Image (cartoon, grey):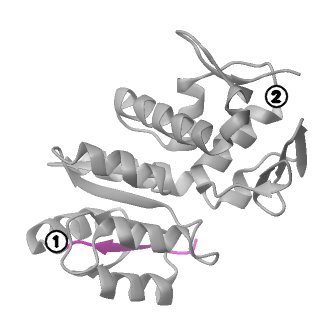
Amino acid sequence: MRQRTIVVVEDEKNISEVIAYNLKREGYKVICSASGEDGLKLIKSEQPDAVLLDLMLPGLDGLEVCRRIKSDPVLRDIPVLMVTAKGEESDIVLGLGIGADDYIPKPFSPRELIARVKAALRRGPLRESLEVEKRLEHGDVVINSVRHEVTVGGTPLELTPMEFRLLHRLASDPGRVYSREELLELAGSGDALVLERNIDVHIKSLRKKLGDKRDLIETVRGVGYRVKDT
């Protein structure tokens, strides 16, 4: 089996060493960087299986690194897990909005770290997790899984990979209500309460990008979400 490679971008040496030690124990190849600029170069050259990214970095910060990864057609499907301090809630929401797949709050336990990384790697690249349908149409909203594109009235939307996953899954079975627990399979495993909240953040961002078609995604109070069966 091919050894999975993980790039860790973290400027605090002690934290970087703890992360690397625990990941290597699980059999991963780990490459570390202490700055955003060097980390981005490393990610481009290595094209790793996952990235652990600190938000507070010298020079190019973690959010900008994440933004550049997710806007690069070659790199955008690489799972990015933000490593954050507990007080950076607004940055967490922003990071998820620009495409980060999950976050690991500091201080973290080795068990939680490994669980989050394994969950991200299980999901695999976006193209491997899509349903069989290549084109889904809901009125003016067209979802093309081959081109990884969503258009509204012919205008492409700039969705993050996670937003695309969620919309495609919901639209594949209109009328069916997906609980947050079911949608967690798209967002990783770990602390259910934290990740359920992540799902809500992604849905909120997705609705905003859908604009006048935001009502396509309905909330079923106390249960979850569905795409309107038209």
Residue 161: image quadrant is bottom right
The residue at the point 59 percent across, 65 percent down is 77
Q: CA distance from mark 2 to mark 1?
A: 45 Å
Farthest left residue in view: 14
Q: On screen, 136 above or below 44?
A: above
Left or right of 5 on screen, residue 225: right
Residue 156: image quadrant is bottom right
User: Label 1 belongs to which residue?
Assistant: 17
The residue at the point 73 percent across, 34 percent down is 213
| Local crowd size for mark 1, using a 10 Å CA cut-off: few (<14), some (14–19), many (≥20) | some
Q: Amino acid at mark 1?
A: Glu
Q: Position of residue 57 (x, y in %)?
A: 21, 72
Q: Position of residue 116 (x, y in %)?
A: 39, 49
The residue at the point 52 percent across, 35 percent down is 204
Left or right of 202 on screen, residue 157: right
Q: Amino acid at mark 2?
A: Asp
Asked whether residue 28 is in view, the answer is no
Quadrant in the picture for the N terminus: bottom right
Q: Position of residue 5 (x, y in %)?
A: 45, 75
Q: Position of residue 56 (x, y in %)?
A: 20, 66
The image's mark for residue 25 is none
Q: Which residues are magenta?
A: 1-10
User: Label 2 belongs to which residue?
Assistant: 173
Left or right of 48 on screen, residue 223: right
